[in-house]
Amino acid sequence: MNGPDPTFQAADVLVDLRILATTDLHMHLLPQDDFTGRPAPGRGLAGVATLVERERATHPNTVLLDNGDVLNGSPAAEFLDPRLPHPMIAAMNACRYDAATLGNHDFDAGPAALVAALAQVRFPFAVTNATLRGARGRIAPFVVLDRHVTDRAGTAHPLRIGVVGFLPPRTVAWNPGLAARLRITDPVEAARAAIPLLRRAGADVIVALCHSGIGAGADMTMADDAAVAVACLDGVDAVVAGHTHAVFPGPDHAACDKVDPVAGTLGGKPAVMPGFWGSHLGIIDLALRRDGTGWRVAEGSGRIEPAGDAPPAPLPAPALHGLASAAARMQHRLARTARPIHNHFALLGHDPATGIVAAAQRWHVRRALRGRPASMPVLSAAAPGRAGGRSGPHHYTDIPPGPITALALSDLCPWPNRLCAVELTGADAADWLERASSIFARLRPGAGDHPLIDPRFPGYNFDVIHGLTWRIDPSQPARYGPSGELIDAAARRITGLRHLGKTVAPEDRFILATHGFRLADGGLFGPLAAGLRTVLVDGPPVRDVLRRYLGRRRRLDDPAPKPWRFAPLPGTTTVFDTGTGALAHLPDLDVPCEPVGTTSDGFFRLRVGL
């Protein structure tokens, strides 16, 4: 007896699944600058929520996922009242997220605060390559979402969507206080072990939430840029990347054999990296075909939708109450300043903001190491925190004369790094500064208007060592690349390195105040820091040190220090882009400059004479 061929009928069943994704929201809820209150279109979960509802209204089968770094990163996160609902969790619950993973910054307030926040969620969290002691029932190694989807003919079908999530392996290195409770394994190995478990649990599709950057695709053990390697695994159907605050698909990433920034694929799999702070919504479309053994991905694509001027969705009352409470706490007065505190010209040698952080670090380390040999002076390394870059032309510290409130702590120290101190030689100090000075593009003497900054180097890597003075010669080649790799062993840009007016000899010894992120393995400074002896391990958060320092000083009336300047290059000019508020501070500069105009992305451009 002949009947319809079930295999043939199943092969004709097609379901379109749309995966919506956010990443690196960093507790930004509203389209505003949380430091000034000014409107900031394209920022905050509220704008993205509008895009999500538009997608849900036009597509029958959607899931909404978050890729981590959601709970910390805005000023409000530092001043939340733990007795109130967490504003971001309340907003995410209202947005009806289906699942999420964690990022490294979700641990910034400590494991207890994280677990308390997770107790409020109404959706599951999957972290596949890490376990957090005390978080049982709050975090799962993977999640299977049971959903009913509608095929192209309008028929409903059950579908099981597996979700895995991955933390950056160096999360504990960046925050050593987590070592007793957080265990992290290699993302690729964890994914390889989880995929068959998910399939046995009935997952028809597997989505990887990879809080990780997009590298060239090398399968390196314990790599932070693991998104490509995870995507290349058999069984992974789609990838959401993040952590580096870039956008994919798009020009932020170069094409290689496993990365297609136009088609939006990693290892041939559809993928997205939806920016940061709610700047974009990631959209992955999968066409699923049912065969005799289950559902298979017939085709897929990834794209990103800018939040732009999307009207913000209303926040639920608990989120608004939490934000209002945090805003009131931010206004607590700590000290006063007689001069503006800004970092518009940090890369031109004038940075009052970073100078205050460095002074606070040096003050604490001197007190903590009172028994140090007198022959080992204390120096302090600090870099500009809010200094433009991908965060835009308004992302600069600019505190006017007058009261310094608690809000300034997050303004001056955007990250919750802990204070550390190391012993180093004069040669080490010179090498530290060579690494920082590699941020400058090489300039040809006598040439005009070459860009000053190598765009591959973020401003937060420009460490200035307070307690020393020196000059930087940008006509010389850079010694190091952005990841700390030696690219020219003969290159030297640092000249005239002195301490208290005396030339620093290679064998001179110092104590350097810095923070745990600088000492972590990898990055621009990691190869140097790995060989240094640590004398203060896992000290207090730099923000707490700064709070105590300002409370002790009460008034900041002294002029801002200027530890370095450029070596003279007569007849040479360069162009430098900075924040839109820089115009009011041009008299602070002691280098010849003139305004050129505004760039297409809103930065204020200066022509600087060297």
Image (cartoon, rainbow, N blue to C red):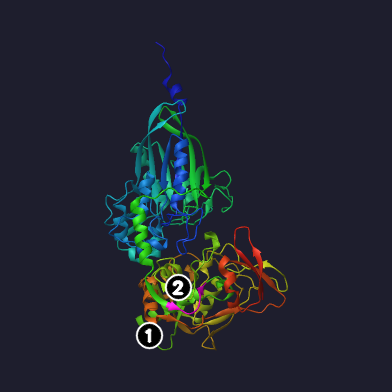
- The residue at which mark 2 appears reads as 531
Q: What residue type is labelled 1?
A: Arg
Which residue is at 49% across, 41% downward?
A: 284
Based on the picture, tell me whether residue 340 belongs to the magenta stretch: yes
Q: Can residue 409 be seen in this view?
A: yes
The answer to which of 486 and 432 lies nearer the viewer is: 432
Which mark lies nearer to you, 1 or 2? 1
Based on the picture, tell me whether residue 41 belongs to the magenta stretch: no
Residue 202 placement (x, y as % from top left): 35, 36
Whole-Å distance between the Cαs marked 1 and 2? 20 Å
- The residue at which mark 1 appears reads as 372
The answer to which of 315 and 72 lies nearer the viewer is: 315
Judged from the image, the secondary structure of the residue bearing numbered disc 1 is loop
Q: Which residue lies furthest to the top in this view?
A: 1
- Name the quadrant of the N terminus: top left
Q: In which quarter of the image is residue 433?
A: bottom right
Residue 70 placement (x, y as % from top left): 40, 55
Q: Can residue 233 be seen in this view?
A: no
Q: Is residue 525 left or right of residue 575?
A: left
Reply above or below: 552 against 579: below
Q: Do the residues labelled 1 and 2 touch (CB within 8 Å)?
A: no
Task: Tell me which label, 1 or 2, sits earlier in the chain.
Answer: 1
Question: From which residue to which does the magenta span run?
Answer: 336-342
The answer to which of 348 and 369 lies nearer the viewer is: 348
